Image: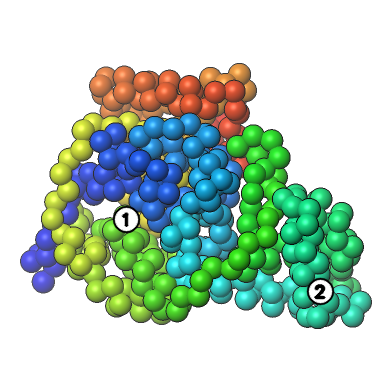
Amino acid sequence: MSARLPLLSTTERRNRLGRRHRLAPSAHAATVAEAADSVVALHATDAATVFLSARARLAEGGPGAVEHALYEDVRLVRLLSMRNTLFAVSTHLAPYVDASTARAIAVKERRTLLKHLAEDGQGLDAAWLAGAEAAALDTLDTSGPLTGSQLSSAVPALRRKITISRGKKYETEQGVATRVIRLLAADGRIRRDRPRGSWTSSQFRWVHTAPWPAVPAAEARAEIARRWLDAYGPATEADLKWWTGWTLTEVRKALAAVGPDQVRLEDGSTALVSPGDTAPEPAPEPWAALLPALDPAGMGWADRRFHLDAAHRPALFDYAGNIGPTVWWNGEIVGGWAQRPDGEIVWRLLGDPGRTAEEAIAAEAARLAAWVGDARVTPRFRTPLERELVA
């Protein structure tokens, strides 16, 4: 039966990646929000990743264009969402990400904090937590934007400390400020504003904002699944489960609502694409890219064999499975890069893609250096090759 399915070759999958992820120059996005939508969401655990992932997909614009999208016209926002990880998504898509994923995380976070408050024994309960949250929001309304430390200094309730795991050998005392702020952010009642320092900083200020419009969870998961297939298909049920962090039941219901088509891959396995999306993707012009740690092109699938030689994985990933800065040629990872303390962008190939590729990669490295300017980028998750390049 699988032999009758349309075949999408590895080359065609790489063509899709170049075009749909907006990495080939002719496919570059006009806006930051368009760049984010092209991959559903940009990883935001590392502040610099949002900027460098957007840069690789934009036709023009420097760090200021990304800052404008995040903090001025607010077309892009950071949400704790897929896999309990921070992502930057367009405000158009944010209600669907919120309903499909972030709501469940927020409920779990609140339940956990209330459990800790009860076990602490100081009489802090849901009513106390509601009061602390209200006081934090009132303070942001009158004095914001504020950093977490500024907010806790201004709100006495946030200076409280509680004991976690009392009586156990790993007992520890923690302040509640970080947990309360995390709850407010997970609920969509505050959002990250400009950081202290440059665009590479993660010391964000916070502002009060309205929660996202309600969307039925099943509808939201179907929308996210559809968009993910558009960007990452052909892919598997296992890929979507890994990327979203949903349960297998949620994944299967979302895919059933989308009604994807099946295709055959070169190794004889089958994969899913959006309905009707089985035609070969026209090849883009040759393209090189230097993508940051955690970029969606490297983190979009559980099975990355179509663009990553397994022999290169140990050099490019950390122990937890986070990908570092990578060098790409025509939809394949061919090396890694880093920025030295003096600002120089250095890179190393892990194979021989040819002279044309090396020249294109060198030119792209020069463009990246000019874009970064005086900023210094050190990935939060260090990988063996990145460490070697800056040693």
Residue 34 visible (yes or no): yes
Colouring: rainbow
Q: Which residue is mark 1?
A: 232
Q: Amino acid at mark 1?
A: Tyr
Which residue is rendered at x = 36% and y = 72% of the image? 222
Along the viewing direction, whichever of 240 and 226 lies nearer the viewer: 226
| Residue 25 position within the rendered picture, expressed as x and y whole percent measured from the top left | 29, 34
Q: Which residue is mark 2?
A: 131
In this view, the mark in front (1 or 2)? 2
Which residue is rendered at x = 32% and y = 31% of the image? 288
Q: Amino acid at mark 2?
A: Gly
Assign a secondary structure to mark 1. Answer: helix
Along the viewing direction, whichever of 116 and 38 lies nearer the viewer: 38
The image quadrant of residue 274 is bottom left
Vertical arrangement, residue 214 with respect to residue 307, above or below: below
| Residue 135 position within the rendered picture, expressed as x and y whole percent measured from the top left | 81, 67
Residue 246 visible (yes or no): no
Q: Quadrant of the N terminus?
A: bottom left
Report whether 333 appears left or right of 186.
left
Q: Earlier in the sequence, mark 1 or mark 2?
A: 2
How crowded pointer 2 is (Cα within 10 Å; few <14, some 14-19, many 20+) is rated as few
Vertical arrangement, residue 79 with respect to residue 21, above or below: below
Assign a secondary structure to mark 2. Answer: helix
